[in-house]
Amino acid sequence: MSSDLVIDVRNLNKRFGTKHVVRDLSLQVSAGEIYGFLGPNGSGKTTSIRMLCGLLTPDSGSGTCLGHDVIRQTAEIKREVGYMTQRFSLWEDLTVRENLDFVGRMYGMRNRRDAVGAAIDRLGLGSREHDLAGSLSGGWKQRLSLAACMLHEPRLLLLDEPTAGVDPKARREFWQEIHELAATGVTVLVSTHYMDEAERCHRLAYIAYGRLLARGTAAEIVAERALGAWTVSGDELAGLAPKLVPLAGVDHVTVFGSQLHVTGRDREQLARSMEQAARQYGDYRFAPAAPGLEDVFISMMDNARDDRQ
């Protein structure tokens, strides 16, 4: 992975009327890196991505994307970026091949036919190339969207929740393709709600209510938060959970399959409470556990201040 920065922005801000949607966003992404962008709905992820690819102009701040100024050189950025939106945005009354050919025309590609053919082969769209886009399943629409945004061979891919509503097999195949692209030097910034996808990224950033709350590798973010976590197993866990919620040091009690997952920011107090509960509820098994990304992000959400309320 190259150390050259493809994205290097500082203190970007964006308001829509009275809503301050993105607050002082600073972000650095290296060439060939898969960078995960996480956060709840309405957190400012999409607005941030659109500022980076030249579709929105920041109200303030500075920086570059692909070496171009994010405020003054948005046209240059657009030519070198592939942007895949949350919703399918191609033409449903055109076939797969017709869609890709139309996108190639918009980019003014001289080798349009060769590029379309290569994209169809690479994404395995050959068996569907004459099907109307509107008749495709979510997974095939996803492949078509990725083919379209890669058609002009961009150096940077911005993917806005690209796997929402797609089945697990299609999600796995999609991520395999993303890692293959990154191995060729393409940089990928991807927003997602899925923790398993977040763990596939080289580095992560977490944004809530317009503010960047954490960034680093998955392991670094979990370690920095220093949460305590315990598991509880046994019969009739649904009846036990409400009894654990009010205990000192307990922030969350969540059902994970056949176990309860108990987390808290005060690890020592949480441990004392769990040890006491283990003595009180002897029919259950209490054990310390390692916190995960989902635990960390839920904890961050609890602490984040929603300025819109």
Image (cartoon, rainbow, N blue to C red):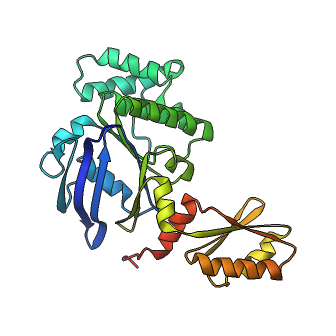
Q: Does residue 137 appear in the picture of this structure?
A: no
Place residue 61 in its image quadrant: bottom left
Question: As rendered, which of 186 and 202 lies closer to the eye?
Answer: 202
Q: Is residue 159 left or right of residue 219?
A: left
Q: Residue at x 24, y 29 (%)?
A: 107
Q: Is residue 117 left or right of residue 81?
A: right
Q: Residue at x 57, y 37 (%)?
A: 172
Residue 270, how many percent across, how many down?
64, 78
| Up-down relation of residue 246 to residue 164 (above or below) | below
Residue 34, how many percent across, how many down?
40, 42
**Viewport quadrant of the C terminus:** bottom left
Residue 168, how many percent across, how many down?
61, 41
Q: Residue at x 40, y 31 (%)?
A: 183
| Up-down relation of residue 145 to residue 233 (above or below) | above
Q: Does residue 295 appear in the picture of this structure?
A: yes
Place residue 304 in its image quadrant: bottom left
